[in-house]
Amino acid sequence: MSVTATKTIGDAAVHVVGAGLAGSECAWQLARRGVPVVLHEMRPERSTPAHSGGDMAELVCSNSLRSDDPLHAAGLLKREMEVFGSLVIDSARETRVPAGGALAVDRRLFAAEVTRRVESHPLVEVSRREVTQLPEGDVVLATGPLTSDALAEVLLGLLGEDYLYFYDAIAPIVDGESLDMDVLFAASRYGKGGGADYLNAPFTEEQYLAFHQELVSAEVAELKSFEKKLFFEGCLPIEEIARRGVDTPRFGCMKPVGLRAPDGRRPWAVVQLRQEDLAKSHYNLVGFQSRLKWGEQKRVFRMIPGLEKAKFERMGQIHRNTFINAPTHLDRRYRIRECPRIRLAGQITGVEGYLESAATGLAVALYLALERRLSEAGAGEALPPTTAVGALARHLTESSPENFQPANINYGLFGELGGRVRKQHRRAAYADRARCDLLGWADRNGFEPEKELDPVSEAEAIRSRQREMERAREEALDPRTAERAGA
């Protein structure tokens, strides 16, 4: 069966609650496989503390979907999703902005494109009302980390008291016209992407030490007294990172490695700014999630060279992200064990990140489509844990319930490689094994690939293009250097 089939399979619609990344991807995948969908979204009738509009798949934190390197785990996950015609990845590529080796988007155009595609599909009915009780039949809860109080109570009744949560932080966005371009310089680390995809604010050692001192002593927005200060390690507020040591930011988001100022010298530290839109009218401060009070953010962040007169379009802020204890409650098909007709997708499952959230929505849709086609609950085999999509479910179901924490996709979640593989060859080995196993799974379960999957060959082609670009840059700077390099 082709994944693009639109013949209706079964009469009962699947109710997908939440039109974020996971819900939008899930609804799209189901509809394209002939399964009717009712997609419920309470925005704009009722908003959340983090959203600003009513479009689907609104990105509330960064505008980056992480690395696009085919041999990076995040890059591999993107390509696995593209095999099945991912809505999120295709829309991201349509609305991408320069971001070095990452896939970043114009967040307004991205959300509008996802919304347009979903709303135009004849098998998707969009309901713009809050859901307070679970619908009958197959239900996918993709309500995200900001699940409404009413549905949170429903889940609490199903799962008991072992909810988990962590605090997530959002980075500030500044007006591009308010930046001092005489101080900032354009460059990507190691010349990745277009070679000049980020603006970089260079620090001297003296500037950095003064900035660090103000950062760690600035006032923060306090959490409620009954709530623990629990942050996700992959998205710590910059001030929390700074408190771990004076050099900790310099080995993290402020690292100067791979960057040279126009005078050829490496800065002591840098803050990178990534463009938010194609017009380059807004930039976000990469890695600068923060829970500082807003007045303090303006004061401290204007100490960054080139941002002395920065106009802040959005301040950094924190919000509570709710997720379940997945090893206790979910099976590998994202079904709640106590009530299998209900499936979860997105960050509420305990995955972390835009990309990972969308991937769980895709996986849930594949499983539901198989069940509808084969007329049997739980029909078909689960995605192999040797693939990126399958590795996410492995993390959710095989981690320790006592120490469960959200995770981005990484090769540590995959099934182990057989035999001894040298360190420099491991990524390629993981990626090639994933390619074979995912295509085999798709073939056995009747899914026709929509895009070729060959991450190793793609990575080699990218490296070749980067070498050519580097030779061209050298030649432009000094023809004799290029001749010596060629010799």
Image: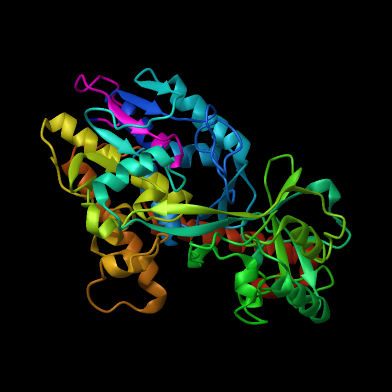
Nearer to us in this view, 162 or 234: 162
On screen, residue 314 above or below 446: below
Query: What residue is at 59 percent from the left and 33 percent from the top?
Result: 53
Number of numbered discs visible in the structure rendering: 0
Could you tell whether 84 is left or right of 243 in the image? left
Occupied quadrant, residue 277: top right
- Give the residues in magenta: 2-24
Where residue 159 appears, x then y in whole percent? Answer: 26, 50
Query: What residue is at 32 percent from the left and 56 percent from the top?
Result: 392
Task: Tell me if residue 6 is in the magenta stretch.
Answer: yes
Quarter of the N terminus within the rendering: top left
Query: What residue is at 37 percent from the left and 39 percent from the top?
Result: 151
On screen, residue 10 above or below 181: above
- Majority SS type along the magenta span: loop
Nearer to us in this view, 285 or 337: 337
Where residue 4 appears, x then y in whole percent? Answer: 32, 28
Task: Tell me if residue 483 is in the magenta stretch.
Answer: no
Say if residue 347 shows up in the picture.
yes
Where residue 100 appears, x then y in whole percent? Answer: 62, 57
Quarter of the C terminus within the rendering: bottom right
On screen, residue 466 above or below 333: below
The residue lying furthest to the front in this view is: 225
Query: What residue is at 77 percent from the left and 62 percent from the top?
Result: 301
Where residue 329 appears, x then y in whole percent? Answer: 23, 53
Nearer to us in this view, 41 or 412: 41
Say if residue 384 shows up in the picture.
no
